Image: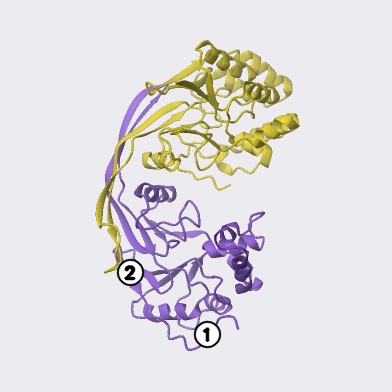
Amino acid sequence: MTHAVLSCLHANLAAVEAVLDDIDRLGIATITCLGDLVGYGPQPNEVVALVRSRGIPTCQGCWDEDIIEGLNACECSYPSQLAERRGQLAHHWTAAQLSPENRDFLASLPMSLRRDRLVFVHGSPNSQHEYLLPDMEAFAALERVVSAGADTLFCGHTHRPYVREFREGSIELRLRRPDGEPGPEAERRVDLPVRRIVNAGSVGEPRHGGTEATYVIHDEDRDTVEIRQVPYDVERTCRAILTVGLPPPFAWRLRHGFEFAERADDASHVCER
Amino acid sequence: MARWALLSGLRGDLDVYEAVLADLRRHRVETLFLLGDLIGLERDCRALLERLQHPRRGELRPHCIYGWWEEQVLAERGYRGERRAEALRRESGEDAVQALLRAVDPGFMDWLAALRFGFVELDCALLHGSSADVGDSLGSATDPLALLDRLTRMDVNRLFTARSGEQFSVALCGGGITARVRDLEGERQLRQSVPSRQVIGVGRGLHYTLYDPGTDHLVFRTAPGPARPHRRGFP
């Protein structure tokens, strides 16, 4: 079976429509969404309504959670105070716009979805706010996949699509216990399983250096993953951002594909929210 | 370099604490760390908590952090926002929660609430559970990938933990992993080695651990049991 996975739609209706058109054109019927339906973008209700109307299984993103729970992310969410101020403005604007039905929908979303050995989360199995960046310490990244009981862990949150495979892993360890106490053997080698993280990138707020929306297609039979880039009407979204009064840098970075916008860089950071 | 003593799980038992202190006098210990679970529900914890706050003349002043039992009482008494002692309630029922509240006088709550989650000394993290959670129980049989993760989160070479109550040392001493990344910029592959790191379970109660950070020398100790000349339990 071939299925599509998308993430970080961020209230960008033009981008979501373009990606769904692309998926339909490819004849793919199974779609999974990794959350962040809202935030940054100018059409939160429209995007939530579209996802609901298509019946797309969706897990909760950090923006979806914060809209429901109130802003309580720690400082890891933003790379600067200016960015944080803009993010808070977008949070309050989005919270004021969302209809009660759409708010209830976001509140009902699960933290993770599972289909056999495929697990779907927004950030990581630990938290919607944790970043699994492509250069994160490999053992820690693999631990996230193993602890989720997954062969392939699909995540988003970083807004940069990638496929990362872990193989030929082992850990050698030496155990010491008080004299005379029974326990596992003193020296052993543990072979680590072959696992994979697939980051779906971002539909509505890409940070890969281009302006195209990104998502991934997984062919389960061939076990291949394709990273898709989909052009969309960026100007339409930019105009809407300015019209509704959201911060102009949100439009500017979409138009220029500014890759470093709002990106948290510390891969080892543990969100303490 | 100063030698450390690391203990945990006193569970309000002053007799056990005194027995360990007596044993420590034979080992030239300069720094004493108490890695949580100072309190428990089995006995009135007042005498031990007063002693920890006010050591006798010539006695080591303990550096304390909070553990799983402190977390439960702090949550139940409203020091953790809306959270309550759900973990204890789930494990042992409502009676256990009430017994814990009786065992810890409310006058100690501010002191308990001021305790830290852990210490980082030199390249060592001293925690009750792990960097993931105060209730994270690491032991000799824990998946080494999880051990490595907990070390990585703290960015330390030694992680001292107490939650499991087990005395053990797991040294991660070899191995590696290959990670291949494919993104819109292309493909790259990196081979990463297992860093030389160690997780140490310090034990609980009379079972404690001595560590010399200068030489990396580790000793698991068991103090002789207390004589228990008098009982400090509830009447």
Residue carrying label 2: B220
Three-letter amino acid code at disc 2? Phe
Locate residue A68, reporting x and y percent. 68, 38
* Residue at left offset 60%, top offset 19%: A16
State which chain is coloured yellow: A
Helix, strand or loop at mark 1: loop
Query: Mark 2 or mark 1: which comes first in sequence?
Result: 2
Locate residue A27, reporting x and y percent. 51, 13
State the image quarter where residue B33 is shown: bottom left
Q: Is residue A166 above or below residue B151?
A: above
Three-letter amino acid code at disc 1? Arg
Q: Is residue A18 left or right of residue B216?
A: right
* Residue at left offset 52%, top offset 21%: A30
Locate residue A34, reporting x and y percent. 55, 30
Q: Is residue A263 above or below residue A174?
A: above
> Which mark identifies residue B231?
1
Q: Chain of mark 1?
A: B
Q: Of circles 2 and 1, which is in front?
A: 1
In this picture the colour scheme is by chain
